[in-house]
Image: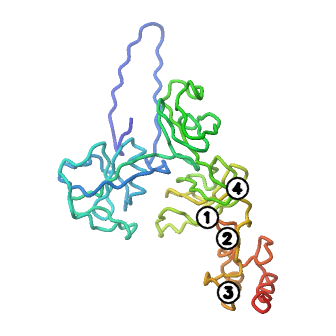
Amino acid sequence: MFLSAGEHEIEIYFQEYTGGAFLYVSWEVTTGELLTGTEYEYIGCYADDGERDLEYMADIASATADSCASHCASLGYTYFGTQWYGECFCDNNYGDYGEATNCDTPCDANSQEMCGGAWANSVYEITATGLDGDAYVCADEWETCECTGWVRYGADDTFTDWVEVDGSIECTNDVFGDPLYGTFKLCECAPYTEAGECSTVYIGSASDNSPETEVSVEYASCDPTPLNYQDPSWNDEFEIEIDGTTITVTRLDSDSGWGQSLEIECCTGSAGSAECDNGDADGSGETDILDIVVIINGILYDDSIFAVNSSGCMIGDMDESGEVDILDIVQLVNVILYG
């Protein structure tokens, strides 16, 4: 069961039939925001009142649809709503007060997104809760998983091996075996990623500063720039290493992990196999003297611009040596002068 923050009294009753009795109680403290890859769909704008339409109010500051979805999904709710610049509510029902027309207050954490209004919720339905990695939940136990790619079956941190699927597969113990006896399970689908294509990889939040995430395919490169909204006040910067199907993300600006959910883009194919225009440092579409200025500034003052992007290309790395130095500037000058 889930309990909100604060003090609670819990009464437990048991019957001793014979012999000695031992009672063990365990618990886990969580923020409720560790689930990542939550998928959701906007339903509409609905009125609220003093007796809340969505009964559970989440204790998170400056919520967005992303953070509210993760929080409510981790508590088992089906619907969530954002209200009045960043309040977050959860429930398994909605709409007691009918529709509203004033969901026009921007979220404090993302002004491009509307967070309901005065006594009005922007209501969403949680449609899937993808776990860490490049997979998403395609079916619960006893249901049919529609997937063209790879599927595994289990719960928590215990899953079967990935099984190749072309279309659909039944999510049952009879098909996969039972990897976790006595536990309600689910299936995850990792769709095929063709050579040269990219996928979203869900990393989540982390208390460890260099967490490892297992994925279903061997990616050639990953872009450290987050795909999902990040609170700019956190100033998070990341570095990514790939070892087979293990992706390690390291936070560079701190050694304390991170609290925001993180999604990145990873691509298959050989790093550098894409058509790279490493000389176009300013992104203008052509190579000229201004690109030389950008590269020199990067070498002298900010080498973070020389990160490998999702296509396996590195700005300024003219000789594809894996680093940017004076030899790359010489080669760029030759390209400008002689083509």
Q: What type is the residue that disc 1 sits on?
A: Pro
Q: CA distance from mark 1 to mark 2?
A: 8 Å
Quadrant of the rendering where the N terminus is positioned: top left
Question: Looking at the image, which is closer to me, 91 or 139?
Answer: 139
Position of residue 80 relative to residue 112, above or below, is: above
Q: Give the residue number, with chain letter if any, for mark 2.
A: 307
The image quadrant of residue 42 is bottom left
Position of residue 262 relative to residue 314, above or below, is: above
Q: What type is the residue that disc 2 sits on?
A: Ala
Pointer 1 with pointer 2, Cβ within 8 A: yes
Q: What type is the residue that disc 4 sits on?
A: Ile
Sequence-wise, the earlier of marks 4 and 1 is 1
User: Residue 46: percent from the left, percent from the top?
Assistant: 23, 55
Position of residue 107 relative to residue 144, above or below, is: below
Q: Secondary structure at mark 3?
A: helix
User: Residue 278: percent from the left, percent from the top?
Assistant: 71, 77
Q: Give the residue number, with chain letter if any, for mark 3.
A: 291
- Tell me if mark 3 has few (under 14), some (14-19) or many (20+) residues whose alpha carbon lies within 10 angstroms of its own: many
Q: Give the residue number, with chain letter if any, for mark 4.
A: 242
Q: What type is the residue that disc 3 sits on?
A: Asp
User: Residue 62: percent from the left, percent from the top?
Assistant: 37, 62
User: Residue 328: percent from the left, percent from the top?
Assistant: 78, 81
Pointer 3 with pointer 4, Cβ within 8 A: no
Q: CA distance from mark 3 to mark 1?
A: 23 Å
